[in-house]
Image (cartoon, grey):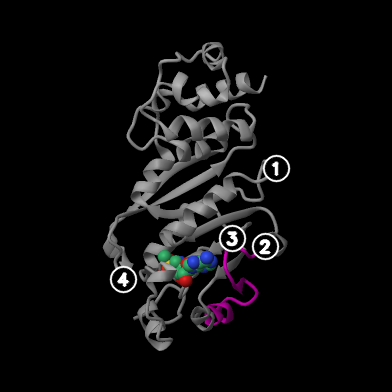
């Protein structure tokens, strides 16, 4: 059967390279090239961008990104068994695909990329959340990337876009929405992957904001939200006691009733409180 790029279908690639999925590497592959091209389109216009892809595996999403016209793709993959199939893609798209065999949590990719940069990944879920937090908390803002298009477990995607007074609202929502605009752009059932995971998945697209949505010191905001959500059912005047004896005054000054609970407070409210606490 012909594919979008003339390379063999992914099932054949996996068979030819004996790429039996490894659970410890979170390997759930996307084999439908129409679907991977669709995910690539959700990342926006790639023709003038370098794309960082983390965890390309046998290269389904990589092929989607290249078929959709990415200027260049830098792919970081931990599993050495994937190097041969990725080299075949590289040969079919001369000068467009570079691959680093390494751990995305350790490799310094910045020196290999030219702005503007978009990050696209279908990652194992544990690594995905850790990388997301790193990408959202660089030392200086704006960060090196313009957008992130990332596959998550559906429940994590819901935590990222959650609004106050909802079940999934918490630190991840505040962190993501403070400096970026995250949106769920695609839902995927387990059967979209081989092997199928137990849970549903969703793609979240984040556009970075030039500046955080509301001013606040990142360290103070982070400490406040950690304390507040560690005891999310308690009133803020008691969950935030350790912030100082005058926490009730500071809550009042920020326009927050001291009897309110963490899950009722908007991002704007937490930022106002962080500014009061930092005074
Ligand atoms: N992108 C491919 C796709 O959509 O079919 C593969 C996705 S699979 C969910 C995750 C990939 O990330 C695997 O190929 C796995 O080997 C790789 N991986 C796991 N941990 C990694 C890490 N720390 N750094 C880089 N790649 C990693």
Q: Nearer the viewer, mark 1 or mark 3?
A: 1
Q: Secondary structure at mark 2?
A: loop
**For the residues marked 2 and 4, what is the alpha-carbon distance in whole angstroms?**
30 Å
> In the image, is residue 207 above or below residue 189?
above
Q: Mark 4 vs mark 3: which is more N-terminal?
A: 3
- Residue furthest out toward the right: 111
Label 4, label 3: how far apart the Cα atoms are: 26 Å
Which mark sits nearer the N-terminus, 2 or 4? Answer: 2
**Do labels 2 and 1 touch, CB within 8 Å?**
no
Quadrant placement of the C terminus: top right
Q: Spatial distance from mark 2 to mark 3, Cα to Cα?
A: 15 Å
Q: Is mark 2 within 8 Å of ligand 1?
A: no
Mark 1, residues whose alpha carbon is within 10 Å: few (<14), some, or many (≥20)?
A: few
Please name the residue that numbered disc 2 is placed on: 108
**Residue 73 higher or lower than 164, as above or below:** below
Q: Mark 1 sits on what residue? A: 140
Left or right: 246, with 9 as reference point: right
Helix, strand or loop at label 3? It is strand
Mark 4, other Cα within 10 Å: few <14 / some 14–19 / many ≥20:
some
Residue bearing the label numbered 3: 51
In percent of the image, x 48 and y 52: which residue is there?
Answer: 129
Q: Secondary structure at mark 1?
A: loop
Q: How many marks?
A: 4
Return the x and y of residue 102 as percentages of the image width and height: 59, 71
Residue at the spot of label 4: 195
* Nearest to N terminus: mark 2 or mark 1: 2
> Is residue 34 positioned above or below 14 on the image?
above
Using the rendered image of the protein, determine whether residue 44 is visible from the camera's viewpoint. Answer: no
């Amino acid at each position: 059967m012909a594919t979008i790029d003339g390379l063999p279908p992914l099932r054949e690639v996996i068979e030819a390279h004996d790429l039996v999925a490894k659970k410890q590497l979170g390997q759930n592959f996307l084999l439908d090239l129409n679907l991977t091209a669709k995910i690539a389109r959700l990342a926006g216009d790639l023709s003038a961008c370098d794309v960082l892809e983390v965890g390309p595996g046998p290269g389904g999403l990589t092929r989607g990104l290249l078929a959709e016209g990415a200027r260049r793709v830098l792919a970081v993959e931990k599993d050495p068994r994937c190097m041969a199939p990725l080299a075949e893609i590289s040969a079919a798209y001369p000068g467009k695909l570079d691959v680093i065999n390494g751990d995305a949590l350790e490799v310094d990719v910045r020196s290999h990329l030219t702005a503007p940069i978009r990050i696209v990944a279908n990652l194992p879920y544990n690594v995905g959340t850790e990388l997301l937090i790193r990408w959202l908390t660089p030392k200086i803002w704006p960060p090196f990337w313009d957008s992130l298009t990332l596959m998550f477990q559906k429940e994590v995607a819901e935590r990222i876009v959650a609004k106050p007074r909802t079940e999934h609202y918490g630190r991840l929502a505040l962190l993501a929405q403070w400096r970026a605009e995250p949106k769920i752009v695609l839902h995927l059932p387990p059967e979209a992957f081989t092997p199928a995971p137990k849970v549903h998945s969703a793609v979240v697209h984040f556009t970075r904001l030039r500046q955080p949505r509301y001013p606040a010191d990142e360290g103070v905001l982070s400490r406040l939200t950690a304390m507040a959500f560690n005891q999310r059912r308690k009133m803020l005047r008691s969950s935030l006691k350790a912030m100082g004896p005058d926490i009730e005054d500071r809550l009042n000054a920020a326009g927050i009733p001291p009897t309110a609970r963490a899950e009722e407070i908007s991002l704007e409210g937490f930022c106002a409180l962080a500014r009061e606490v930092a005074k």
